[in-house]
Image: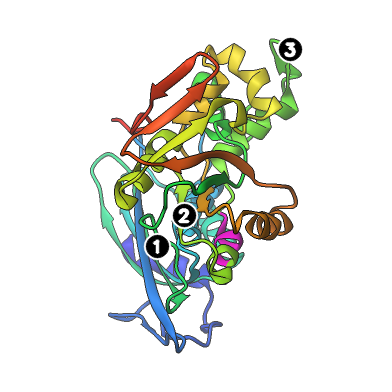
């Protein structure tokens, strides 16, 4: 079974090797790749476990493949890197079909190919009861031109690349209705919320857009040094920045990027849109800090890539906490973001 699966993935990944930087690929003991001159390597890895990170009641294999790639690509974008090579490790439970792996592999490769990433190796093992997917991504970043979590300064402004909370709302909809692919394609809507709105939120969870190009542009201009991708919610991810930079942050409730789609849907979920935006996970938007002096130029660069102006949501302050500012007062939200549970 393992040999057949490896051969299937190798065939779909493409042979002979199309990427000239890949000297030896799938099927040998090690991949051999040729890094670019004047670059450092970046390395990130993520594992998705069935019933913890995804549920096959509503995740079709093609979307699961794309998300497996997107999670890692988002990390590469957060450091401003150029993703190049990927390694896929699978722990396969009984009952997985050839059709599943065909569609999963096509989804994975479709997302990787958007950023020129070659799948060059990996491993497969048997698992007793849960499917586990691990992707390791290796890329490059120009020397001295990467973003980190550790350089935010007091009075820096905090920006976000897109709407928050939509992926979390999509997950709640999927859990509630548990239908695959397009859960609301045969519905006119639910409680006055249109099918288009519902599917927008579902797709934000199933098929997130990693902000790789934006991260690369922010790193290249030299005016931004600190960024993070929003995978666990602003309350937690901004707390990571604060810890690493030894600062605090305040975020402004009135400026939180909450979409009309989220506002319309939050009522049927019984969750406030602000809570979803602050603590919901897996938006995979990019969060960065910038000095007030460099703010106008950086905002222009981001807007050109995004097609709209990024959202200014707060500022860096003295201290070590993430504070939410509302019209009613202040609230500590440090590390109150999303956590995966069994």
* Residue 9 percent across, percent down from the top left: 46, 66
What residue is drawn where x is 55% and y is 26%?
253
> In 3D space, how far apart are the residues under numbered discs 3 and 2 (Cα atoms)?
38 Å
Q: Nearer the viewer, mark 1 or mark 2?
A: 2
Instruction: Give the image quarter of residue 336.
Output: top left
Q: Earlier in the sequence, mark 3 or mark 2?
A: 3
Residue numbers of the magenta segment: 211-216
Which type of secondary structure does the marked residue at label 3 adopt?
Answer: loop
> In 3D space, how far apart are the residues under numbered discs 1 and 2 (Cα atoms)?
37 Å
Instruction: Give the image quarter of residue 297.
Output: bottom right
Instruction: Please give the label number shown on residue 5.
Output: 1
Q: Nearer the viewer, residue 103 or 321?
A: 321
Which type of secondary structure does the marked residue at label 1 adopt?
Answer: helix
Q: Residue 214 in magenta?
A: yes
Q: Nearer the viewer, residue 8 or 259?
A: 259
What residue is drawn where x is 46% and y is 86%?
36
* Main secondary-structure element of the magenta-colored stretch: helix
Residue wearing tag 2 = 227
Q: Is residue 233 visible in this depiction of the protein?
A: no
What residue is drawn where x is 54% and y is 23%?
274
Instruction: Please give the label number shown on residue 318.
Output: none
In the picture, measured across the screen, residue 71 lies left or right of residue 113, that is left
Specify few, some or many for label 3: CA neighbours under 10 Å numbering under 14, 14-19, or 20 or more.
few
Which type of secondary structure does the marked residue at label 2 adopt?
Answer: strand
Residue wearing tag 3 = 192
Q: Earlier in the sequence, mark 3 or mark 1?
A: 1
* Residue 218 percent across, percent down from the top left: 57, 63
Q: Residue 102 in magenta?
A: no
Outermost residue toward the left in this view: 128
In the rendered image, the quadrant that contains the N terminus is bottom left
């Amino acid at each position: 079974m393992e040999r057949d699966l490896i051969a299937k993935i190798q065939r779909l990944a493409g042979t002979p090797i199309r990427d000239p930087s890949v000297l030896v690929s799938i099927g040998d003991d090690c991949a051999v790749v040729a890094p670019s001159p004047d670059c450092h390597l970046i390395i990130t890895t993520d594992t998705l476990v069935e019933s913890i990170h995804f549920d096959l009641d509503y995740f079709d294999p093609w979307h699961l493949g794309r998300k497996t790639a997107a999670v890692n690509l988002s990390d590469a974008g957060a450091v401003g890197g150029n993703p190049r090579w990927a390694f896929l490790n699978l722990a396969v439970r009984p009952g997985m079909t050839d059709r599943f792996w065909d569609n999963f592999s096509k989804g994975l490769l479709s997302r990787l190919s958007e950023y020129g990433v070659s799948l060059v190796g990996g491993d497969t093992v048997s698992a007793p009861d849960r499917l586990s997917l691990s992707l390791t991504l290796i890329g490059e970043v120009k020397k001295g031109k990467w973003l980190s979590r550790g350089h935010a300064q007091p009075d820096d402004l905090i920006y976000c690349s897109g709407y928050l909370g939509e992926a979390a709302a999509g997950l709640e909809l999927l859990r509630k209705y548990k239908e695959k692919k397009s859960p609301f394609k045969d519905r006119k809507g639910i409680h006055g919320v249109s099918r288009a709105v519902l599917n927008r939120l579902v797709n934000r969870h199933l098929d997130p857009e990693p902000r790789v190009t934006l991260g690369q542009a922010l790193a290249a201009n030299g005016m931004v040094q600190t960024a993070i991708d929003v995978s666990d919610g602003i309350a937690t991810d901004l707390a990571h920045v604060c810890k690493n930079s030894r600062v605090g942050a305040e975020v402004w409730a009135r400026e939180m990027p909450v979409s009309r789609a989220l506002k319309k849907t939050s009522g049927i979920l019984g969750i406030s849109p602000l809570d979803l935006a602050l603590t919901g996970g897996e938006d995979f938007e990019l969060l960065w800090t910038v000095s007030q002096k460099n703010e106008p130029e950086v905002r222009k660069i981001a807007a050109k890539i995004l097609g709209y102006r990024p959202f200014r949501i707060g500022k860096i302050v003295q201290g070590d906490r993430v504070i939410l500012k509302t019209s009613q007062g202040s609230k500590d939200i440090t590390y109150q973001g999303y956590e995966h549970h069994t």
